[in-house]
Amino acid sequence: MSEQTPYKFNIDNNREILLNLPEGVFVPTGTTTNLINAVKGYLKEPGKVLDLGAGSGVVGIALYLSSLVKSPLYASDLSERSIKCIQKNAEIHQIPVVTKTGSLFEPWNGNTFDYIVDDISGVAEEVAALSQWFDNVPCQAGVDGADLVIRVLQEAPEYLNPGGVLFFPVLSLSNSERILNTAHQHFGQVKLLRHEEWPLPKEMYQYMETFNRLRAEGYIQYEEKFGMMLWSTDIYAAFNS
């Protein structure tokens, strides 16, 4: 992996993390920040942590630096490029890490965790294709953006210790109702930790016909407010019995 200028990512108002972030690795977004801060705000003690769909590894690294991870950090991603990136970033921050390449929980058979933090793509594929969020990064979340998140929710209980917690984002640019129905089917308790609204980037307004169609089909949700098109991110915790 070639050396490059470190990418600066603000995880809150008080801390900035430097990352190696080569082309083809998902660039952290506002949803990433909200996920990190929701987990930090909820957890009171460290545990065995899996950063699932880790990308650059920023979520797990931020939690480790906040003393919420029992060493080592565990992280996986479908992309070998991302795995090398995670290893580099863990080295930069002197964090012991166990990394594996593979789809969702496939690499972790036989392992269980206290906390699983899921930041896997949850955006309707047509929206992802029109956005800049997935430049050179695949998004195969299905027509309504729910497929991968639902698979995580269905499989996660097998990989959580008793009393373990799965943290996951739900974007309104996906079928949030289908996702939450699945969460309640597989977990005894599901709790909303954080809600954030975002303006749709102006460059995407040219695709409003597509957005309106997807909303009419029930695949995404957004609303008009203050002369803007607003979508949202909700961060949830699901508790394993």
Image: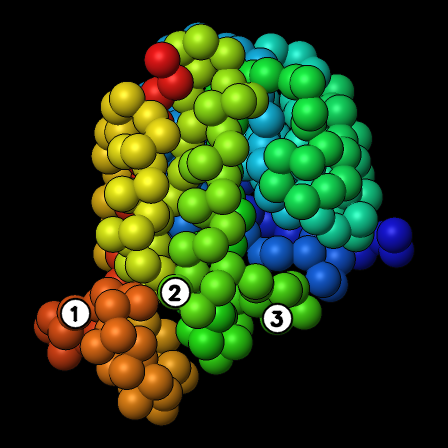
Question: Which is more foreground, mark 1 or mark 2?
Answer: 2
Work out whether 155 lies above or below 29. above
Q: Which mark is residue 135?
A: 3
Q: Quadrant of residue 73?
A: top right
Is residue 139 visible in the rendered image? The answer is yes
> Label 2 crowding class (10 Å Cα cut-off): few <14, some 14-19, many 20+?
many
Three-letter amino acid code of the residue under disc 1: Glu
Three-letter amino acid code of the residue under disc 2: Asp
- Residue 84 x %, y %: 81, 43
Work out whether 200 lies above or below 20. below
Residue sitting at the far front? 185
Three-letter amino acid code of the residue under disc 3: Asp
Residue hosting label 1: 223
> Label 1 crowding class (10 Å Cα cut-off): few <14, some 14-19, many 20+?
few
Query: Which residue is located at x 74 percent, y 24 percent?
Result: 97
Q: CA distance from mark 1 to mark 2?
A: 17 Å
Query: Which residue is located at x 47 percent, y 24 percent?
Result: 157
Asked if marks 3 and 1 touch (Cβ < 8 Å), the reply is no
Depth check: give the residue in front, 186 or 103: 186
Residue hosting label 2: 144
